Amino acid sequence: MQGSAATTAAKNRARVALVEKAPEDNAGRNTYFTPAGFRCCFDGLPDLLPFLYQSNGTKSLSDDLVKRIEMAPYTKEDFHADINRVTKGRADPVLANVLVDNSRDAIQWLVGQGAKFMLSFNRQAFNVDDKSKFWGGMVMNMIGQGKELFKLHNEWTRKTSVTIFYCSPAIELLTDDSAGDITGIKALQHGRYRRFGASGGVVLASGGFQASPALRSKYLGPGWDLCASYGCHSVAWDANSPVEEGNHTITNQYTKSGYPLGLMLNTPQGIAFQIWDAEQAKWLRIEEYADDVTQNIRTNTLDELADKLVAKGLKDKAQFLATISEYNEAVDAFSREKPHHKFDPAIRDGMSTQSQSRQIMPAKSSWATSLKTPFYRRRGHHGNYIHIRRTGRRAILGGLLWDNYPGGSGLMMGTVLGRIARKKAAARAEHVRKGSSAHQRAQL
Ligand SMILES: Cc1cc2nc3c(=O)[nH]c(=O)nc-3n(C[C@H](O)[C@H](O)[C@H](O)COP(=O)(O)OP(=O)(O)OC[C@H]3O[C@@H](n4cnc5c(N)ncnc54)[C@H](O)[C@@H]3O)c2cc1C
């Protein structure tokens, strides 16, 4: 999100240098790999319509489509409640207010800069009873995803004459200790140190420390250095993905997020198997689970599936079958007690493994349906195996997020805070030109 920062500053007539660690063809890290979901407050679908495009880039949605969408407003209270829930109440309230209060404006600003948003039909909605039912409060993403967002950032920086220095990791902040001021940065460029003076200030937009195994283990705890890391948050990642780095072409297609609809069975070897009944598999997103995207195994019986998974690294077939059997019994017990409870993937439907007569650990509290051979179908269970690659959810910004974040608020946070920080930097630079004192600049 360096671009939104740099562009805002440059538009405020400041000279801006953007110092980037990566080479040009590998820059943009986390942002590049996102689906570019953005979370903002809005007053129902009509409020968002002016921002929206169809997935092919055509402006506005047809009346017919609009009629088939079910979407609740997402209020400031909702956004705050989500932040509090996922950060376990530890979010800095001032920063949370800044994020929430400026979120809708930020979308408007992005649209003004040429960003095109579409409704996240494939990620945040399910088609139930011929209605697209949106869930979770985050309903939009940028067309073209993170790749397009990164491209836009580059275009903005070019238009506003921001100078970008690639292959130039910043290694130190330069300070004027007598004035208590940050005066620039020291970067390493082609084996030499280079100093960049910065009278307006330095805005850090370097992502988190998730790429460093040493820092992960130091700050997150033992074992975190063993995880493979491409991004800033925990994510289930395809077991067949290359170990060393992200793939710029297919970006986040390695993400495998269909686990709420089936079962995810962990193994001590660090690989988990995702298992669905054929009936549930129809809800999976094709861009993540199509046969040419991931390795899927379909069989008619669970026993057959277990045999095939043994060839993929499953060590304990008996335990695998016993776990699923225990799960199925718990689902059946719930269905017997509440026969009218209905499966609905678009809400927390309460279809659970926990009933009066039967409980299992860990519980599945919604979308629990049994994994059994559907005799009336030729295709049976649908297995898919993934690595669970967990990474720390830390960003360079401290205080706002702890443990987790509401999806779509990472990019929003970068946009909102980037714009504020850079406006301030531009104002500070102006004060320096006018000869204001360090104390006066600090008041900005
Ligand atoms: C798979 C995945 C999907 C995600 N999906 C979403 C989503 O849909 N919506 C959402 O809001 N959030 C999402 N996130 C979170 C989101 O990616 C981050 O919140 C956001 O990208 C952080 O932006 P950033 O600019 O701080 O960091 P980055 O995008 O990682 O950019 C940091 C930049 O700083 C450079 N850099 C690092 N160190 C230095 C240094 N010392 N000197 C100079 N340059 C340096 C890096 O090379 C990089 O170009 C997702 C994350 C992942 C991993």
Image (cartoon, rainbow, N blue to C red):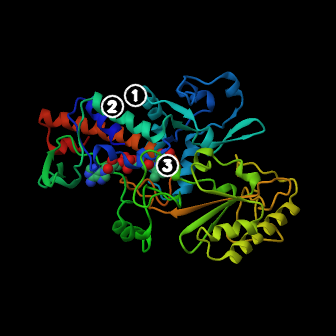
Quadrant of image for the N terminus: top left
Quadrant of image for the C terminus: top left
Residue 203 is tagged as: none
Give amino acid for label 3: Asn
Relative vertical location of residue 329 with respect to residue 277 in this rendering, above or below: below
Give how far across and how far down residue 346 sits, in percent: 70, 46
Closest to the observer: 218 or 74? Answer: 218
Residue 252 is tagged as: 3
Give amino acid for label 1: Gln
Question: CA–CA distance between discs 1 and 3?
Answer: 25 Å
Relative vertical location of residue 117 with respect to residue 408 in this rendering, above or below: above
| Label 3 Cα crowd, 10 Å radius (few <14 / some 14-19 / many 20+) | many
Secondary structure category for the residue under label 2 = helix
Discs 2, 1 touching: Cβ within 8 Å = yes
Residue at (45, 41) in percent of width and height: 146
What residue sits right under mark 1 in the picture?
113
Give how far across and how far down residue 21 sits, in percent: 27, 50
Give how far across and how far down residue 229 sits, in percent: 42, 60
Residue 156 is tagged as: 2
Residue at (28, 38) in percent of width and height: 424
On the rendered structure, is 415 left or right of 336? left
Give amino acid for label 2: Trp
